Structures are given as C-alpha cells and as structure tokens.
Amino acid sequence: MPKKISKFLLPLLLIPTLLFAQSTIEDNPYFKRSMELRKQSEEALTKGDYDAAYRYAEEGLKELEKFESVNSYLLAEQRMNTARQRGLNNQDPELFAQIVEEVDAARANLQAEKFAEGKEHSDSALLLLDQLMSKTTNLVETYTVVKGDSLWKIAGRPSIYGDPFAWPRIYMANKHKLRYPENPDLIYPGQIFDIPR
C-alpha cells in the first residue's frame, strides 16, 4: 500500500516546480485545493491511515489535472494573442482560424468543467501555434525603447520573446546602433531596435 501512496504523492510534491510564478499558482483554486489535499495525505500517512492518505492523494491529483488544464488554456490563449499582436494571423489566416477554434473550444470545455477535453484543445492550439511560428521564423520586427526599458525587460515582454535571458539576441542584432556598443546597459528612449525572430 505505501508504494501506491508514494506513486500519487510524488506528483503532488513536484507542484512547486511548475512553470508559472508562485503568486499566480497560489491564486489558482485548484492548486490551493491540491496543496490542502497533499497536506491531509501526508498527515494521514504519518498517522498510518494508508487508505485515507491514498484517497487524499488521488483527489489531489484530480485537482492538479484541473490546474494543469487551466494553465494550458491560459498559455494557449496568451500565445494566440501574442501571435495576433505580431500580425501572424495574416500570415496564414486558415491556420490561425483553427487556432482560434481550438482556444475557444478549450475555454468552453473548461467553463463546462470538462477539464481533460479542455486540455486536449489547449494542447492542440499550442501545436498549431508552433506550426504557425515555424512558418514565420525569419521575421524581423522593430521595438522602440521607452523610458525605464532595458534589454532584459524588452526580451522578457510576451510580445517579444517572453524570456528575459534572450536579451543578448537583441544586443547582438543592434550593437551597431548603440551609442556605446561595448555597454548593453546604455539604451535610450526613442532608439529603434530590430527584434530578430
């Protein structure tokens, strides 16, 4: 019996390593519930009540699946909106229409509390978005620096890379435009940078 319990507890113990920021995770009701159930399962296990520990762990996994479904949908929706902002909906309108359908279907399923189906549609939308992005990998866009910007902040914007660690790509593509090319920290409002894709 303890092996079965550990099989269910392990995924619950890994929850904190999920992709989203801790404050976002803690706001999610499914995450909160899964953490409560994890604690109850651990307490029951400590008391030797293996049946209760198993039930709590199993219920916690169901809550975790709901949480993952919601996060998958949010990621698909965010990436779809970013693609639209970049004008990729005009690159392949038919493919983009499929993406919109999948995201809408995911939303409808989640609202109906059909979490597995919602996750399937979200995952499908993410695959279609990958296809769309692979068709447009050679695009170069521009970004106008505003007060308070840094290459780190620019690269971290969802509409740019969504990854602040990608700032060297912007730096290398625009080094020749900088007043002091050896110092990537000195950028000024009004500068227009190329954003290689």
Image (tube, helix red, strand yellow):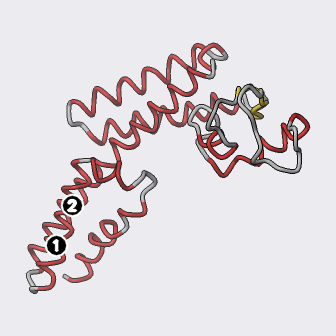
**Residue at figure coordinates x 21%, y 60% from the top left:** 60
**Residue at figure coordinates x 70%, y 43% from the top left:** 151
Is 11 placed above or below 76 here?
below
Q: Is residue 78 left or right of residue 86?
A: left
The kind of residue on which mark 1 rests is Ser
Residue 135 appears in the picture as rendered: no
Q: Earlier in the sequence, mark 1 or mark 2?
A: 1
In percent of width and height, residue 96 lies at 55, 19
**For the residues marked 1 and 2, what is the alpha-carbon distance in whole angstroms?**
9 Å
The part of the image, by quadrant, that contains residue 62 is bottom left
Residue 193 appears in the picture as rendered: yes
Q: Nearer the viewer, residue 77 or 105?
A: 77
The kind of residue on which mark 2 rests is Gly
- Classify the position of the C terminus by image quarter: top right
Q: Secondary structure at mark 2?
A: helix
The part of the image, by quadrant, that contains residue 50 is bottom left
**Residue at figure coordinates x 63%, y 48% from the top left:** 164
Is 136 placed above or below 153 here?
above
Marks 1 and 2 close (CB-CB < 8 Å): yes
**Dot 1: within a 10 Å radius of its alpha carbon, few (fewer than 14), some, or many (20 or more) residues?**
many
The part of the image, by quadrant, that contains residue 43 is bottom left
In percent of width and height, residue 104 lies at 37, 23
Q: Secondary structure at mark 1?
A: helix
* Location of mark 2 (residue): 60
In percent of width and height, residue 75 lies at 45, 38
**Dot 2: within a 10 Å radius of its alpha carbon, few (fewer than 14), some, or many (20 or more) residues?**
many
Q: Is residue 106 left or right of residue 196?
A: left
Q: Nearer the viewer, residue 170 or 75?
A: 170
* Location of mark 1 (residue): 41
Q: Which mark is residue 89?
A: none
- Classify the position of the N terminus by image quarter: bottom left
